[in-house]
Amino acid sequence: MRTAMVDITELIHQARDGDAAASEQLFAHVYDDLRHIAARQLGRQRGQMQVTSLVHEAWFRLARPDALRMNDRAHFYAIAARAMRQLVIDHARQRVAGKRGGGEVMLELDSQVATAGRDSELLALDQALEQLAEVEPELGRMVEMRFFAGMELAEITDVTGRSERSLKRDWRRARAFLHARLSNAEVLPE
């Protein structure tokens, strides 16, 4: 596994320097992982947007040499997950703009599966995550990596340099914050 990480990191650096062959190799190496992240992003919305389309749209954003300012493999996947999240949110906003329905939104957060099934739920989750990122930027980034990219705490530890124990504590705080926001309750972050 370490070899694959080094190869991907090296390919990222070469692609960033403008090496088109490295960019193609990078895409080939990460394609299945990007599809997995895209499937997590779409959750139960797969009829609205296709996994392959999401992967390709995100890749177009990521593949430009000026966009490949990533440190390593884990950073690449975190950025890819963020790009996909933004694409899914933009897509949901376009659909909701024509519908404009009301009603309460309730989501159940899980560390393994994004359960936002309806556009309004997805937009509520996005808004709650943006509120979290305003108050606690590190918690917002951790939620993106764990919830949207599907990274395990050990992988996040590698990216952030923080202990798994402190990440577990932060994950509980982030979940509590998001649950409170999604159920329209006020909570002050610790």
Image: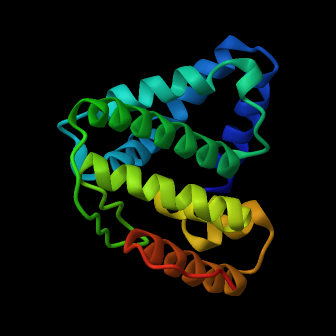
Q: How many labels does the image show?
A: 0
Task: State whether residue 50 is above or below residue 182.
Answer: above
x, y (%) of residue 10? 76, 35
Left or right: 187 as drawn, with respect to 50: right
Residue depicted at x 23% and y 45%: 45
Residue depicted at x 66% and y 65%: 156
In this orientation, which residue lies closer to the viewer: 81 or 76? 81
Residue depicted at x 43% and y 33%: 90
- Whether residue 150 can be seen here: no
x, y (%) of residue 51? 31, 35
Residue depicted at x 35% and y 26%: 53
Residue 125, image quadrant: bottom left
x, y (%) of residue 109? 38, 72
x, y (%) of residue 104? 26, 64
Task: State whether residue 12 is above or below residue 61.
Answer: below
Residue most extreme to the left: 47
- Whether residue 75 can be seen here: yes
Left or right: 85 as drawn, with respect to 155: left
In this orientation, which residue lies closer to the viewer: 187 or 4? 187
Q: Quadrant of the N terminus?
A: bottom right
Left or right: 56 as drawn, with respect to 74: left
Q: Quadrant of the C terminus?
A: bottom right
What color scheme is it?
rainbow
